[in-house]
Structure formats: C-alpha cells, structure tokens
Amino acid sequence: MLSGCGTTEPVIKVVTQRVEVPVPVACKEEKPPTPDYCFPKLTTNQTIYEKSRCMLSDRELREAYEVKLAAALQACK
C-alpha cells in the first residue's frame, strides 16, 4: 500500500503539430467577355460562301474564348 504513494507523477508531453486545412477563397478573376458571333446575324439570302466564312470565323472566336475561360479558371485554383 505504501508503494502506491512512492511512484512519480506521469510525464505530460506537449507536441505541437501543424495541420494544413484547405479554406475556400472567393475567385476574383472576372469572366472574359463573350465574343460577338456573326452566325446569329446571318440571313437566308446570303451565299453559302459567306455563311461558311462566318462559321469559320466564329469557330476561331470560340476557340480563343475557351482559352481565355480556361486561363481564368486556372487562375482561380
């Protein structure tokens, strides 16, 4: 019974750990302006060549717009 009083107190060891937690942050990147496509402005009396030229230029505009959107999205990560 006396042996129980003769023991030392337990040693408390303090260890500091760093835990990184992802925190959502609002994206401050603005959406690029939508290009002015010519396809909706086409009329039925235009030739097939004018229509195809318009569609090809709209395709290039869309591809450039997608690159800008991807860059804006990447900047938000």
Image (spheres, grey):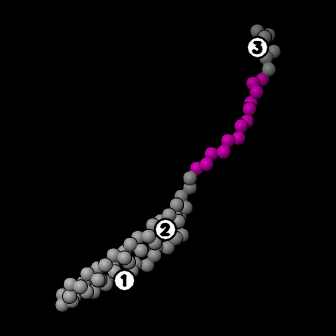
- Which element is circle 1 on? loop
Query: Mark 3 or 2, which is nearer the eye?
Result: 2
| Cβ atoms at labels 2 and 1 below 8 Å apart | no
> Is 18 drawn above or below residue 74 in the view shown?
above
The magenta region covers 9-21
Please identify the residue farthest to the top as the structure is shown. Answer: 1
Would you call the spot at circle 3 few (<14 residues within 10 Å), some (14-19), or many (20 or more)?
few
State the CA–CA distance, disc 3 to disc 1: 87 Å
The answer to whether any part of residue 39 appears in the image is no
Q: Amino acid at mark 2?
A: Ala
Which residue is disc 3 drawn over?
A: 4
- Is residue 15 magenta-colored? yes
Q: Position of residue 43 (x, y in %)?
A: 22, 88
Q: Residue 74 versus residue 45: which sits nearer the camera?
A: 45
Count neighbours of disc 1 (C-alpha within 10 A) and say few if under 14, some if 14 to 19, many if 20 or more: few
Q: Which residue is mark 1?
A: 36
Residue at 73%, 36% (x, y): give it.
14
Quadrant of residue 6 in the image? top right
Q: Earlier in the sequence, mark 3 or mark 1?
A: 3
Residue most extreme to the bottom = 45
Q: What is the spatial separation of the Cα atoms under label 2 and label 1, in whole angstroms?
A: 20 Å
Q: Which residue occupies 41% across, 70% down?
A: 66
Magenta segment main secondary structure: loop
Q: Which residue is mark 2?
A: 71
Residue drawn 46% across the image and 72% down it: 68
Residue 24 x %, y %:
53, 58
User: Is residue 31 shown left or right of residue 51?
Assistant: right
Q: Amino acid at mark 1?
A: Asp
Q: Which mark is residue 48?
A: none
Label 2 crowd (10 A; few <14 / some 14-19 / many >=20): some
